Amino acid sequence: MVIVDDDEIAELNERYLGHPGPTNVIAFPMQEGDFAHINPGLLGDVVISAQTAEREGQAAGMDFLHRFDQLLIHGILHLCGYDHEKSLEEEERMETKSRELWETIQEGETVR
């Protein structure tokens, strides 16, 4: 996991995805492509913009860590093959799994 500011994630977003401007999270999977065999146990990298997470959290009425955790889950799900951009069915599947993981995290926090 890499935590960056809006300028850094905007650069990555443009360079690797061809999208201008900052975004909240980018996942770089390591399980596919020419070099996937180098470390097959490594899922990949999740890059999160702390500035965007803060803005989005405030806009949604949630604290920074809540939004950050949502983005981390989202990025990890992308590394596991979920892709909300493929279809509405995939979007719903990813959202369901995100909620399940969020609820599991919340249950774990009450146990600590």
Image (spheres, grey):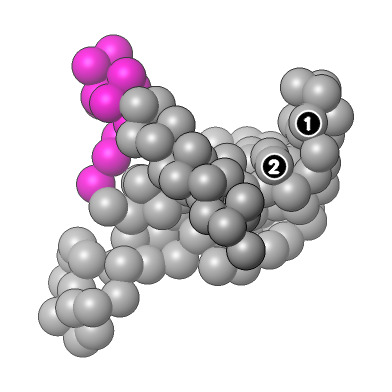
Please tell me whether residue 87 is drawn above or below residue 99 in the rendered image: above
Write down the residue under mark 2.
66
Membership of 54 in magenta stretch? no
On the image, the x and y values in percent for residue 9 come to 66, 53
- Depth order, front residue of 74/52: 74
Q: Residue furthest top?
A: 88
Please tell me whether residue 75 is drawn above or below residue 1 in the rendered image: above
> Magenta segment, which residues?
81-94
On the image, the x and y values in percent for residue 101 come to 42, 43
Q: Quadrant of residue 111?
A: bottom right
Residue at 28% across, 13% down: 88
Q: Are marks 2 and 1 in contact (CB under 8 Å)?
A: yes
Write down the residue under mark 1.
62
Q: What's the residue type where badge 2 is placed?
A: His
Question: Would residue 16 appear left or right of 52 to someone viewing this image?
Answer: left
Residue at 44% across, 31% down: 99
Question: Would residue 76 appear left or right of 24 to someone viewing this image?
Answer: left
On the image, the x and y values in percent for residue 66 come to 69, 42
